[in-house]
Image: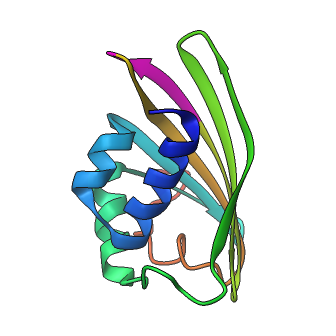
């Protein structure tokens, strides 16, 4: 699976809150870190998929699109930068990846939301001090 497919898998996992799909693209110990409205939030993939599932985002939400801004690899490590546009705002994310047993897996996804982007707001209130 190349980085473009990983990016697509991440978006699909988030839109559906699909833990099985998340397991295909995220390392089991991956972290999700986000910042919106000055609040820093961290959680694991399982917790993040539960939040995404509760959002019940439609598969093809009007006004939603994503684009890959950067996809680079150097040996067994890679980086992706995505921009997701929603009618309510935008989410920019950076992902670090490692190639494990021939598969690219996301180690960390760091998000920054602007406006009323839907992917960060419902996360549990775990902040810098936690």
Q: Residue, x 54% and y 48% (percent of image)?
A: 7
As for residue 99 lying within the magenta part, the answer is yes
Seen in the picture, residue 63 relative to 48 is either above or below; the reply is below
The N terminus - image quarter: top left
Position of residue 108 measured from the top left corner of the image (x, y, whole percent): 51, 38
Residue that protrudes farthest toward the left in the picture: 20
Seen in the picture, residue 100 relative to 34 is either above or below; the reply is above
Seen in the picture, residue 60 relative to 16 is either above or below; the reply is below
Q: Residue, x 36% and y 84% (percent of image)?
A: 56
Position of residue 35 measured from the top left corner of the image (x, y, whole percent): 65, 60
Magenta: main secondary structure equals strand
The color scheme shown is: rainbow
Seen in the picture, residue 59 relative to 108 is either above or below; the reply is below
Q: Quadrant of residue 37?
A: bottom right
Instruction: Tell whether 67 sits left or right of 120.
Output: right
Instruction: Tell whether 123 sits left or right of 7.
Output: left
Q: Which residues are magenta?
A: 96-101
Q: Quadrant of residue 40?
A: bottom right
Q: Residue, x 48% and y 43% (percent of image)?
A: 6
As for residue 10 lying within the magenta part, the answer is no
Residue 42 in view (yes/no) = no
Position of residue 46 measured from the top left corner of the image (x, y, whole percent): 27, 54
Position of residue 24 measured from the top left corner of the image (x, y, whole percent): 31, 42
Q: Quadrant of residue 15?
A: bottom left
In the foreground, 42 or 97: 97
> How many labels, in total?
0
Residue 36 in view (yes/no) = yes
In the foreground, 17 or 121: 17
Q: Residue, x 52% and y 33% (percent of image)?
A: 2
């Amino acid at each position: 699976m190349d980085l473009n497919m990983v990016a697509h898998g991440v978006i699909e996992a988030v839109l559906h809150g699909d833990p099985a799909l998340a397991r295909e693209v995220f390392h089991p110990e991956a972290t999700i870190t986000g910042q919106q409205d000055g609040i820093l939030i961290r959680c694991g993939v399982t917790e993040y998929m539960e939040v995404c599932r509760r959002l019940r985002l439609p598969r093809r939400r009007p006004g939603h699109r994503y684009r890959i801004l950067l996809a680079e690899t150097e040996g067994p490590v890679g980086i992706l930068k995505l921009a997701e546009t929603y009618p309510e705002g935008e989410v920019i994310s950076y992902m670090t990846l490692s190639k494990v047993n021939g598969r690219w897996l996301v180690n960390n996804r760091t998000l920054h939301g602007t406006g009323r982007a839907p992917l960060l707001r419902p996360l549990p209130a775990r902040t810098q001090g936690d």
